[in-house]
Amino acid sequence: MRYVILLGCPNNRTRDRLGIIASRRLGGAVVRNRAKRRLRALFRQSLAADDRRAAQFFDVVAIPRRELATAPWPVLEQEFRVGLARLRAAR
């Protein structure tokens, strides 16, 4: 994946959860905060789009790459959805 690395682990809760790792290598505080805001928005949007009667819920850890802060939104949406689908299919 070009903009974000997604790791996941099944949980026994009734919803998905998101954790974000944004290190200083990503950039200054402004860049890190923008990347985290974008990831949270993508996650909320994917939850709204998904059918919430999923058989398994996940704890998702997202590690943004530098390009995420400036990437076009439609491309980010597509990549995030594909990444989540791969996580769910792998488990």
Image: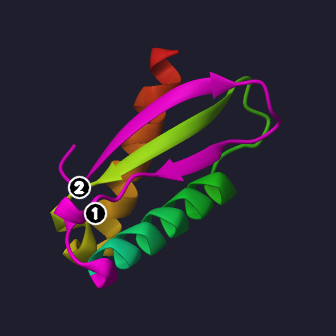
Q: The magenta stretch spans which residues?
A: 1-30
Identify which amino acid the numbered label 2 is placed on.
Tyr
In percent of the image, x 43 and y 68: which residue is there? 36
Q: Is residue 52 magenta?
A: no
In percent of the image, x 35 and y 70: which residue is there? 35
Kind of element beneath mark 2: loop
Identify which amino acid the numbered label 1 is placed on.
Val
**Residue 12 image position (x, y, % from top left):** 77, 24
Indicate left or right for 60 with 51 as reference.
Answer: left
Seen as rendered, the residue at the extreme top is 91
Relative vertical location of residue 59 with respect to residue 4 in this rendering, above or below: above
Indicate left or right for 41 with 21 as reference.
Answer: right
Structural crowding at the residue carrying mark 1, measured as other residues with C-alpha within 10 Å and reported as few (<14), some (14–19) or many (≥20): few
| Res 69 quadrant in image | bottom left
Alpha carbon distance from label 1 to label 2: 9 Å
Disc 1 vs disc 2: which is toward the camera? 2
Q: Quadrant of the N terminus?
A: top left
Q: Is residue 19 magenta?
A: yes
**Residue 89 image position (x, y, % from top left):** 48, 21
Say which label, 1 or 2, has the lower sequence index: 2
In percent of the image, x 57 and y 55: which residue is there? 46
Q: Which residue is mark 1?
A: 75
Instruction: Between residue 41 and residue 51, name the one nearer to us.
Output: 41
Kind of element beneath mark 1: helix
Relative vertical location of residue 70 with respect to residue 17 in this rendering, above or below: below
Seen as rendered, the residue at the extreme front is 24
Q: Which residue is mark 2?
A: 3
Seen as rendered, the residue at the extreme bottom is 30
Relative vertical location of residue 54 with respect to residue 44 in this rendering, above or below: above
Structural crowding at the residue carrying mark 2, measured as other residues with C-alpha within 10 Å and reported as few (<14), some (14–19) or many (≥20): some
Indicate left or right for 63 with 87 as reference.
Answer: left
Whether the residues at callouts 1 and 2 have beta carbons within 8 Å, the answer is yes
